Image: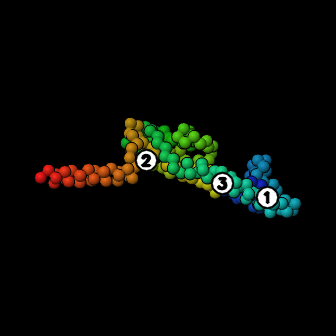
């Protein structure tokens, strides 16, 4: 069955595209949800108009969501969970838990279906993709620690600063020793 997409459909195409899809998918999902119409002669005449309108709406939406994408890309979530000796969790970190963590940490509300990840079942650092629009797909960092562990406090930049401060203190002490002699 050929359909004309009215709205962008993730992993299928953009608005104005003509796609061949399975009959059941078109009849039971795309058409009832208002995402597509049958590709008739009259509908095909509208394809260019739909494409232009969708491109304008997409540009506006991307501009609005770019601020949220920047916030999300700098977000680091930390979860503590029970784990076995091999680092495998007894439970899992679900997409709903990630959404709740994002809302708590940055105040941004996201639908759990926009998180592109299977449940996290192991300790360590994981990169999670958040699908805001078809063009904006920021990546957040999720750190899963064992129960009782704490997140590293300093970043590599801070460690470099601490080393420089220690070096400057030791050189000033050396200067004092020279003055005293």
Residue 25 in the figure: left or right of residue 151 = right
**Seen from this angle, which residue lies furthest left?**
181
Disc 3 element: helix
Which residue in the structure is indicated by mark 1?
50
Residue 52 is drawn in which quadrant?
A: bottom right
How many residues crowd mark 1 within 10 Å: few (<14), some (14–19), many (20+)? many
Mark 2 or mark 3: whose residue is earlier in sequence? 3
Disc 2 element: strand
Q: Which mark is residue 124?
A: 2
Which residue in the structure is indicated by mark 3?
62
How many residues crowd mark 2 within 10 Å: few (<14), some (14–19), many (20+)? some
Evaluate whether residue 119 shows in this view. yes
How many residues crowd mark 3 within 10 Å: few (<14), some (14–19), many (20+)? some
**Whole-percent x, y for residue 67 in the image:** 60, 50
Q: CA distance from mark 2 to mark 3?
A: 32 Å
Q: CA distance from mark 1 to mark 2?
A: 45 Å
């Amino acid at each position: 069955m050929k359909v004309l997409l009215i709205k962008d459909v993730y992993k299928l195409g953009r608005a104005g595209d003509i796609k061949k899809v399975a009959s059941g998918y078109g009849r039971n999902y795309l058409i009832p949800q208002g995402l597509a119409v049958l590709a008739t002669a009259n509908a095909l005449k509208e394809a260019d108009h739909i494409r232009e309108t969708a491109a304008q709406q997409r540009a506006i939406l991307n501009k609005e969501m770019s601020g949220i994408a920047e916030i999300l890309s700098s977000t680091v979530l930390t979860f503590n969970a029970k784990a076995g000796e091999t680092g495998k969790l007894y439970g899992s970190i679900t997409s709903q838990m990630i959404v709740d963590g994002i809302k708590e940490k940055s105040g941004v509300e996201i639908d759990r279906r926009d998180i592109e990840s299977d449940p996290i079942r192991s300790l360590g650092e994981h990169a999670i993709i958040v699908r805001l629009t078809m063009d904006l797909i920021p990546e957040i960092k999720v750190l899963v620690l064992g129960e009782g562990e704490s997140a590293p406090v300093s970043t590599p930049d801070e460690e470099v600063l601490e080393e420089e401060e220690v070096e400057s203190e030791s050189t000033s002490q050396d200067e004092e020793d020279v003055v005293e002699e």
